[in-house]
Image (tube, rainbow, N blue to C red):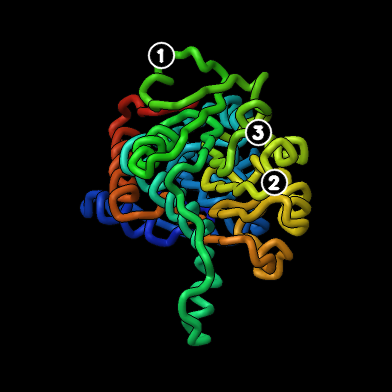
Amino acid sequence: MRIIFCGDTFPAARFLLQERLPLEANDEICVWPDRNAIADLKPADVLIPMMFRIDASVMDATRCRLIQQWGSGLEGIDLEAARSRGISVAGVPASGSNADSVAEHALLLILALLRQLPEAQANVRKGILGSPLGRILRGRTVCLYGLGATALALAWRLRAFEVRLLGITRDPEAAKVAAFGLDSCYPISRRDAGLSRSEILVLCARLSKETRGLVDADVLAALPPGAFLVNAARGALVDYRALYAALSSGRLAGAGLDVYWEEPISPDDPLLALPNVIATPHVAGVTDASYAEIADRVASNIERLRRGEPLVNCAI
């Protein structure tokens, strides 16, 4: 079976998958690093997109049978094109160790922002002790925008810090909301009421046509002056220009970002030069436990395809 990783990012993925496929199958695992080099593509059974857009031209060039996402979120795949060609599309649930990993990373970004970690590290190199003056997390109001598996894992962890916990979701009356232990929960129609109380806004929403650019100038203006934004979900949830303006003006105290509008983000992007931005390279879900679970699920679906059995977690 021929398996193509579309993109050379997240290198641990291909090695972990190789370990889980049977040696006797003699599967060929390839990497297609250049999205523009369609002519270099050869027929394949499985495509695994790694931050690459999989459209009709890629499907036609490879004549693949399965497009298997390494993780959750299928926004990078042309689902209509796949459906019309009879190509199966599958993902991996965001729950389990992946949700735990992203939640831990979101917590890392929150604490790094409050304690001004970049300045603290710089002061070590300068020989300066006792500076900067950090801020404590206990007693602050944290708002989770979107209440899925990652938000639930983060809510459990934040409770240990004795924060006031808010949520914004489509249906605040849903039975699942009780599991979050929120102090207050707001529907989308009343989100500004929740935002106005939020000292730290953490994005946990899925990316869709409806949520693309949802954090715009109006949302940022609804936050109290000096609030923080954390995004380890999807970069396109945030309007770039609105975020840059809020950060550069100082109205937003800081942002912790693990995902971006174009990935990888250019090292010369002006946003990265702002002193109140802490950026990491899309590693929130890249942990030993998370990747082991994802690799198991991806390998299992490939084996199902090999045996002609029904695939799991399919969108198509």
Contact between marks 3 and 2 (CB within 8 A): the answer is no
CA–CA distance in space, label 3 to label 2: 9 Å
Residue behind mark 1: 175
| Type of amino acid at the residue the image marks with label 1 | Ala
The residue under label 3 is 196
Q: CA distance from mark 1 to mark 3?
A: 25 Å
Mark found first going from the N terminus, 1 or 2: 1
First-in-chain label (1 vs 3): 1
Q: Residue at horizontal 77%, vertical 41%?
A: 217
Measuring from the top left, give residue 49's x and y in whole percent.
51, 47
Inter-mark Cα distance, 1 to 2 = 33 Å
Q: Residue at x 34, y 50 (%)?
A: 291
Image coordinates of residue 74 in percent, x first then y, are 54, 36
Q: Secondary structure at mark 1?
A: helix
Disc nearer the start of the sequence (3/2): 3
Task: Give the image quarter of residue 177.
Answer: top left
Nearer to us in this view, 145 or 293: 145
Query: Relative to residue 308, is residue 281 drawn left or right?
Result: right
Rendering quarter of residue 223: top right
Question: What residue sits 33% from the left and 59% below the top?
Answer: 15
Q: Secondary structure at mark 2?
A: loop
Q: Nearer the viewer, residue 196 or 139?
A: 139
Instruction: Check the image and report above or below for 184 versus 51.
Output: above
Q: Amino acid at mark 2?
A: Pro
Mark toward the viewer: 1 or 3: 3
Give the mark toward the camera: 1 or 2.
2
Q: Give, as a three-letter code, the residue at label 3.
A: Ser
Q: Give the labeled residue for mark 2.
A: 225
Judge the density around disc 3: few (<14), some (14-19), many (≥20) Cα neighbours within 10 Å: some
**Residue under the point 45% across and 58% down:** 10
- Examine the rendered structure and indicate whether residue 138 appears above or below residue 28: above
Q: Depth check: 258 or 24 in front?
A: 258
